[in-house]
Every structure is written in C-alpha cells, then in structure tokens.
Amino acid sequence: MSRGVIWGIVAVGLLWSGAARAGEVFGGAYVHDIDDGISYGKFEKGAQIVIGARTTALDELAFLGKPRVHLLAGVNTAGGTNYAATGLSWRFHLNDRLYVQPGIGVAIHDGRVNLPSPDAPGITPEERLKRLRDFQTKLDLGSRVLFEPELSVGWRATPRLSVELSWIHMSHAQLAGSYNPGVGDVGVRLLYRYGLDR
C-alpha cells in the first residue's frame, strides 16, 4: 500500500472525526519496533512520527461505556512501516490532572506481508538461505489489516494542553497464521483540546 493511499485514508478520517465532534488533536514521536513482550522488535529502525485526532466521550456509544473514537497515522523516518488506525478509547481519570486511557482499533499498513517461506519445496539452497535471512532481518506482519491495541497515561498541563506517554501495538493475533511478530511503538505525544472534555 502506498503512502499516498494511507494519507488519503487519514485525510478522510480526520474529516469524519471533525464531523463527529473531535475534541482533541495530537502529535508525537515514538521509538519504533520495540521488544515489548508481545512484539519481537528490532527489525526496523528510525522513529515513528504519529499524528491523530480523538472525539469527546460519545453519548451515542453509551452502551459501550461512552468511548472516544480515535484516528491516527504513523510515518517511519527510516523508510520502515507506515500505518493508519482507527478505534475506540476509554479515559479513566485518576485525579484532576492524571488519566489512563486504553484503546482498541484496527490498522492498515504498508509494510511487508507474507515473505516467501524458506521451507518451500523445490527451492535452491541459496534461495533457502536468502529467505531465512529475510525472516531473521525483515519485519513481516503477516496481514495488511491488524488489530491496534494501545495504552496511554496522560497528564493535563492546562485546560487545553495535555502530554501522554503512549504505547501502540499492531498484530494479527495469530488469525493470519502462527507467525505473528507484531510491532510496538512507545513515545510521547502532545495533545491540544479544542472541544469538550468529558
């Protein structure tokens, strides 16, 4: 999937989220492809620049606990995997300034999917070694569409500005096969709140 397609999806999503009473926009920098216990990590280099928007807590989704709808896009600075994701987030206030916010969504990406197997019959020993090296050195996410769980811890600096420590994970949860390295990003993002905060 080209970067143009991903950015087109992001633009449409941002317009949609604006129509859905987007309450905040955010941007930040992340350490990309970490070993976080559920992602293998260390296949790709570079930082991940993430931008996005989030609605207020939606009364229309009261049957789900009034989640916020989020939309985000991540671009890798070293030519690695880029992605766009959308989903639901739930904010739990710990006090007037601190909150925890888990979320779950779906993502699409432009990274590798289904590298050729080194165990395929009829290939040469050289081709088998090349494919084995690819499996050991290249991130293969196994599916173009992935689950996107995330978790943020936020600090509200002012009524309009917040800072979040954020973790974003993407994987297919072994629905596309047993090989599921996943990818995890951890970073800090700055949020600007321009709508309601509830």
Image (cartoon, helix red, strand yellow):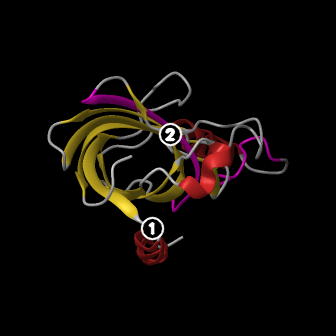
Residue 98 visible in the shown view: yes
Tell me the quarter of the picture where residue 35 sits.
Answer: top left
Tell me the quarter of the picture where residue 18 sits.
Answer: bottom left
Binning the other alpha carbons within 10 Å of mark 1 as few (below 14), some (14 to 19) or many (20 upward) gives: many
The residue pinned by badge 1 equals 17
Q: Residue at x 30, y 42 (%)?
A: 30
Q: Which residue is drawn at 73% across and 46% down?
A: 117
Q: Is mark 1 on a helix, strand or loop?
A: helix
Specify whether 49 is left or right of 174: left
Q: Residue at x 73, y 49 (%)?
A: 124
Q: Where is residue 154 in the image (x, y as percent from the top left)?
A: 30, 33
73 versus 169 height, above or below: below
180 versus 110 height, above or below: above
Report the front residue among 73 and 56: 56
Q: Residue at x 63, y 59 (%)?
A: 144
Specify whether 23 is left or right of 123: left
**Residue 102 among those drawn in magenta:** yes
Q: Residue furthest right?
A: 121
**Residue 17 among those drawn in magenta:** no
Amino acid type of the residue tagged 2 in the rendering: Trp
The residue pinned by badge 2 equals 90
Q: Where is residue 146 in the image (x, y as percent from the top left)?
A: 62, 50
Specify whether 74 is left or right of 164: right
Q: Earlier in the sequence, mark 1 or mark 2?
A: 1
Report the front residue among 175 and 124: 175
Q: Where is residue 123 in the image (x, y as percent from the top left)?
A: 77, 51
Mark 1 vs mark 2, CA separation in Å: 16 Å
Report the front residue among 7 and 19: 19
Amino acid type of the residue tagged 1 in the rendering: Ser
Q: Position of residue 125 (x, y in %)?
A: 70, 43
The residue range painted magenta reads: 96-120
